Image (cartoon, grey):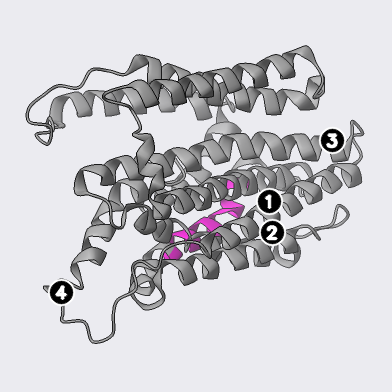
Amino acid sequence: MQGLGAAAVGMILGGLLTAELSWRWVFFVNVPLGVAGLAATTAWLLPSSGNGGQRRRLDLPDALTITLGTGLLVYGVSAATEYGWGSAAVIASLAGSAVMLAAFLLIERRSSHPLVRLGIFRHRGLSVAGVVMLCAGVLMTATIFFLSLYFQQVLGYSALRAGLAMVPMTLLMVVGSFVCRALVPVLGVRKLTLVGALPTAAGLGWLTAVPAQSPTYLVHVLGPTLLIGAGLGLIILPATISATAGLAPHEAGLASGVINMARQIGGAVGLAALVTAASTAAGHAPDPVAIVHGYHVALAADAGVAVLAAAAALFLPAAGKSAPRAAGPGSPAAAPLRQDSAATSESSAGVHQ
């Protein structure tokens, strides 16, 4: 939830930096923040005592193969717009990605201390929640990206005004994430994810009707973006609870890391794929009608991703819903929900970085 609030501020600051300095500063500003975070971690983060005082080595082969694999996958998909799917650059990138990801899985299977214990994916809640979070990454990243392009290229907004135009949607995401805490014990994670994913799909479907000629923000854009914001705010917490419910305490952090990784990979790969789809549909014509048609195709595919998230939600285990007449906050029946909610803090704080 803190991350969603930061996203709302980031919309404004990103637009301000782009308008007053350069779009490059959107990336430069992360360098001092990263350095400060690293320094704070070194100074104040306490060492874990959960492994009996043994120090874990840095798993460089694991980290390098998964990073190179996902990076090559994103590059291959995004480069298809410029070079074509049959080009040597795209084929080599996708093949290299497959090799690196296969190497990662092989290393994890053989390692005595794997970066990601593959057996954890036998936990249905984590596996299905990973699919939901993969979809959520696509929905958040791609929706904001195409809205930003529409605001600036069609409505003629400045970067700052485009950022301000997306604040209502982001604020509704924040409100939804707070409301979600109260709704989980009532509806459970499965129904709540459906309640979030279906309005998101409806809002994205509504956006496929935005016109290229004489559009206005209040008439054509505000309504669907509010619907999307309200829906997205209800997806993250239920998925995180489902991923960590029933796991041993020492694996809750791994589960949170896995679904956060799923969200990040979904955002990167999904955005690359949707940009390729939009560019292919629009062609190379600078005609606003063709450009908006490309946006329509990408947003329709984005709506399909929201429907996929809703379908995946049907397979989530029934976790989080409180039994009627529970004995109270100190009872055993209430303990699982408290544990699951506590385990979400790391993942919720990292949403939409």
Magenta stretch holds residue 253: no
Q: Give the x, y percent position of residue 291.
A: 84, 42
Q: Main secondary structure of the magenta part?
A: helix
Q: Give the x, y percent position of residue 146.
A: 69, 45
Q: At numbered mark 1, what does the secondary structure look like: helix, strand or loop?
A: helix
Q: Earlier in the sequence, mark 3 or mark 1?
A: 3
Residue 62 falls left or right of residue 87: left
Q: Which residue is mark 2?
A: 204
Neighbour tally class for label 4: few under 14, some 14-19, many 20 plus, Cα within 10 Å: few
In-front residue for pair 122/283: 122
Amino acid type, residue under disc 4 in the picture: Pro
**How far apart, in angstroms, are the residues tagged by discs 1 and 4?**
40 Å
Magenta stretch holds residue 169: yes
Q: Which residue is mark 3?
A: 280
Q: Which residue is mark 1?
A: 302
Q: Earlier in the sequence, mark 1 or mark 2?
A: 2
Residue 90: numbered disc? none
Query: Which contiguous range is marked in magenta?
Result: 162-176
Q: Nearer the viewer, mark 2 or mark 4?
A: 4
Residue 329: numbered disc? 4
Residue 124 falls left or right of residue 154: left
Neighbour tally class for label 2: few under 14, some 14-19, many 20 plus, Cα within 10 Å: many
Q: Residue at x 54, y 26 (%)?
A: 70
